Amino acid sequence: MSWRHTFRSYLAVIRATEGDTASARQHVDRLRTVDAHPVLVGQAELALQRIDRALDAFARLERDDWGGIGVAATLRYGPLNDSRLLQPIRDEARYRALIRTGNAVWGLDPDGRMPEESGT
């Protein structure tokens, strides 16, 4: 992931959280123009409360993308570690499927527990 794209995504989240949605949308549009990493686009869309767009972006994640801690942290704990931003999608089936994928890549049980904790 490009640091510039990461920075732009964070700016979009910050601007949206501050209520400056016009600026946040400009940052998201730019991220989409440069085909930024799906988690960067998704977290910015999520901050704008564009749930379907955020989930569509997250759905573009490849299995290999889960190898880095950044993807897992964003999808488990929220953009910039603000769990309130994830609240609108936590009950979505598409979100739960993403987390199950991440759990599988990390060698966890589908519910996120370590295999030895569940007895498997």
Image: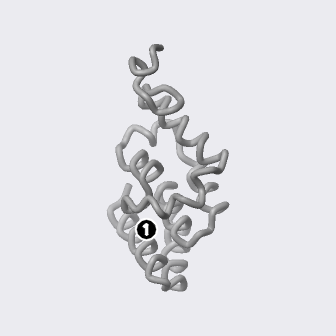
Q: Quadrant of residue 3?
A: bottom left
Among all residues in the image, which is located at the extreme left? 3
Residue occupied by mark 1: 9
Q: Nearer the viewer, residue 118 or 12?
A: 118
Compared with 11, 106 (above or below) is: above
Q: Position of residue 2 (x, y in %)?
A: 36, 59
Among all residues in the image, which is located at the extreme front? 118
Residue drawn at (59%, 69%) of the image: 49
Q: Nearer the viewer, residue 35 or 64?
A: 64
Q: Amino acid at mark 1?
A: Ser
Number of residues whose C-alpha sits closer than 10 Å to that of mark 1, classed few (under 14), some (14–19) or many (20 or more):
many
Q: Is residue 11 left or right of residue 53?
A: left
Classify the position of the N terminus by image quarter.
bottom left
Residue drawn at (59%, 61%) of the image: 88
Compared with 88, 23 (above or below) is: below
Q: Is residue 76 left or right of residue 42?
A: left
Compared with 11, 39 (above or below) is: above
Q: Considering the numbered disc 1 on the image, is that residue within a helix, a strand or a loop?
A: helix
Q: Position of residue 95 (x, y in %)?
A: 59, 48
Q: Position of residue 47 (x, y in %)?
A: 51, 69
Q: Which coloring applies here? A: one colour
Q: Is residue 51 left or right of residue 61?
A: right
Q: Position of residue 104 (x, y in %)?
A: 50, 29
